């Protein structure tokens, strides 16, 4: 089985500093590589090869500009720019059995790509804003609605903690068995029926 992990395209994999989601992707990919063929799609950063191996995992880099407009919106803009570039690189996904995204915007495009190439789609929610009612208008009207849609349409949706899982279920109506806590991830992903 071939699994393609999709990063946010904002923090380099492997992360040099910070990057909890990217560290999660790398560790999960390393574990999954014991039973499956795994690659990671990430942004191309300066002085990098387009494709290389690290920890035995193939990392494919996609070229996308990085914007430095304003500290409050740089992260979101750069995630969206990278996510849209996924569409231009379908060849990376054509033989994937599973496409696994870990970010709202890459998840949106990765879900469309999975449908197009006939792959199963897995989405992992790392988004702590589900654990509070004190969210801004953007988080409430765009982030929660789009992330809810992605999690509903995914073949498997995962929350990185039980607390996050319970908060998502409380705020949205999900089939309880479909939204998993991350400890069951390895078993479920590696046993997806093709």
Image: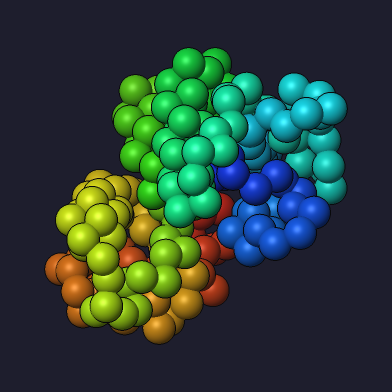
Q: In the rendered view, does 76 fall on the left or right side of 19?
A: left
Quarter occupied by the N terminus: top right
User: What is the number of callouts on the image?
Assistant: 0
| Residue visible at 52% across and 18% down in the picture | 89
Quarter occupied by the C terminus: top left
Task: Kindly indicate the quadrant of the structure image that contains residue 162.
Answer: bottom left
Q: Describe the colour scheme in one phrase.
A: rainbow
Task: Kindly indicate the quadrant of the structure image that contains residue 136.
Answer: bottom left
The correct choice, above or below, for 100 with respect to 174 in the image is above
Q: Point out residue 65 in the picture as x, y percentages from the top left corner.
A: 58, 25
Q: Point out residue 176 in the picture as x, y percentages from the top left corner.
A: 25, 72
Judged from this view, the residue extending furthest toward the front is: 70
Q: In the rendered view, does 88 fall on the left or right side of 41?
A: left
| Residue visible at 72% across and 46% down in the picture | 13
**Can residue 184 be seen in this snapshot?**
no
The correct choice, above or below, for 72 with respect to 176 in the image is above
Front residue of 77/179: it is 77
Q: Point out residue 53 in the picture as x, y percentages from the top left corner.
A: 82, 35
| Residue visible at 76% across and 59% down in the picture | 17
Q: Point out residue 168 in the picture as x, y percentages from the top left corner.
A: 28, 72
Task: Kindly indicate the quadrant of the structure image that contains residue 119.
Answer: top left
Front residue of 95/28: it is 28
**Can residue 55 be seen in this snapshot?**
yes
């Amino acid at each position: 089985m071939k699994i393609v992990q999709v990063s946010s395209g904002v923090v380099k994999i492997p992360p040099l500093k910070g990057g909890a989601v990217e560290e999660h992707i790398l560790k999960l990919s390393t574990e999954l590589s014991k039973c499956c063929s795994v690659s990671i799609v990430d942004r191309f950063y300066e002085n990098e090869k387009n494709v290389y191996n690290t920890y035995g995992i193939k990392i494919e880099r996609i070229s996308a500009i990085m914007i430095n407009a304003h500290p409050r919106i740089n992260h979101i803009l750069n995630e969206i720019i990278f996510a849209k570039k996924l569409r231009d690189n379908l060849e990376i996904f054509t033989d994937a059995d599973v496409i696994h995204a870990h970010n709202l915007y890459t998840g949106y495009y990765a879900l469309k790509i999975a449908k197009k190439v006939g792959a199963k789609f897995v989405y992992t929610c790392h988004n702590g804003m589900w654990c509070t009612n004190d969210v801004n208008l953007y988080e409430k009207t765009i982030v929660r609605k789009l992330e809810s849609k992605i999690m509903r349409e995914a073949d498997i949706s995962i929350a990185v903690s039980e607390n996050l899982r319970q908060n998502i279920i409380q705020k949205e109506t999900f089939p309880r068995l479909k939204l998993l806590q991350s400890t069951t991830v390895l078993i479920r992903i590696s046993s997806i029926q093709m």
